[in-house]
Image (cartoon, helix red, strand yellow):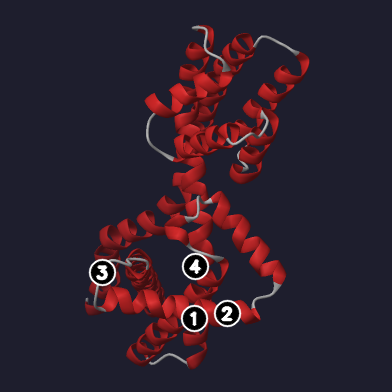
Amino acid sequence: MQDILTVILIVGSALLTAAAVAFLGIGLYQNVFERFLSEVRDESGGGMKGAGSVAIRKLGVINRRFMWPSYEAKARRKLIKAGEPQGYKPEDIMAMQEVSAVLALIFGLFACNAFNATFAWALLVMLIGLYYPLLWLNDQVKKRHLAISRALPYSLDLLTLSVEAGLDFTGALAKVVEKGKAGALREELQLVLKQLKMGKTREEALKSMIVRVDLPPLTTFVTALIQADKMGTSLGKVLRIQSTQMRIDRTQRAEKLAGEAPVKMLFPLIACIFPTVFMVLFGPIVFQFFFGELAG
């Protein structure tokens, strides 16, 4: 019995240690990759920053010849939704995938050598590194959507007050851009304002913003504006209704997230915290019980 218990404790400890090492490795790799992404586009810097930027752009030019249209369209769409971070292009994302795969393979080889693991684990780490830039790009889209969602109620209130004060839509939009908080939403509204000044209709400029951002709350708000413009409804009234509804939706979303928090905390508690606590508290007691009886 004590042998079985010893094996269970040893295996559990090994699994927990391996999971901790894996999470630590992922965190270190993410930190290195994020630093690399923040430095390769530094055109003003010298030394390795300039060399890294040139290398990525050269690799991107090579990738341009072999990049298939579906990958390019999907990557460009993601980049637009992410706000084109640091001016990346689809071929740059492919170059980042290649560099990330090589770095991950080197990291995997070192890890396999340290833990005497097979080469298959290094290949698995390389595949994770290959797809990490795409995960990073999706994360950038989520961050931008979150920033726009948080800034939308304030900007909508400011737009409503400006319209109700007597300004037309273009003047009210200019006031929001001037007085609004800096961020992704302000950049999008500023682009809409530029398109309006260049001669685009309100519907065309707003529909372009819907396509660029692709965020349901913003899409609902902009669609209501377009319908109000077509039907001749009072813009101030529509904005007031949308502002009230948006704040109600925001409160309901916050309550939903608060209700989901205990459920999301359940898995880390059961899988990570409880086993460690049980091993620390009851492990010595169990060992003392069985080995004490064996010695007696």
Closer to the N terminus: mark 2 or mark 4?
Answer: 2
Nearer to us of marks 3 and 2 is 3
Q: Which residue is mark 4?
A: 133
- Residue 148 rendering spot, x and y as whole percentages: 49, 36
Nearer to us of marks 3 and 4 is 3
Closer to the N terminus: mark 1 or mark 3?
Answer: 3
- 84 vs 280, nearest the viewer: 84
Q: Name the mark on residue 63.
A: 2
Amino acid of disc 2: Asn
Q: Is residue 60 visible?
A: yes
How packed mark 2 is, by other alpha carbons closer than 10 Å (few <14, some 14-19, many 20 or more), is some
Q: Which residue is mark 1?
A: 59
Left or right of 208? Residue 248 is: left
Question: Residue at coordinates 39% horizontally, 87% vertically from top-left?
Answer: 106
- 212 vs 141, nearest the viewer: 212
Q: Which residue is mark 3?
A: 45
Measure the alpha-carbon separation of dots 3 and 4. Answer: 23 Å
- Using the rendered view, name the quadrant where residue 168 is placed: top right
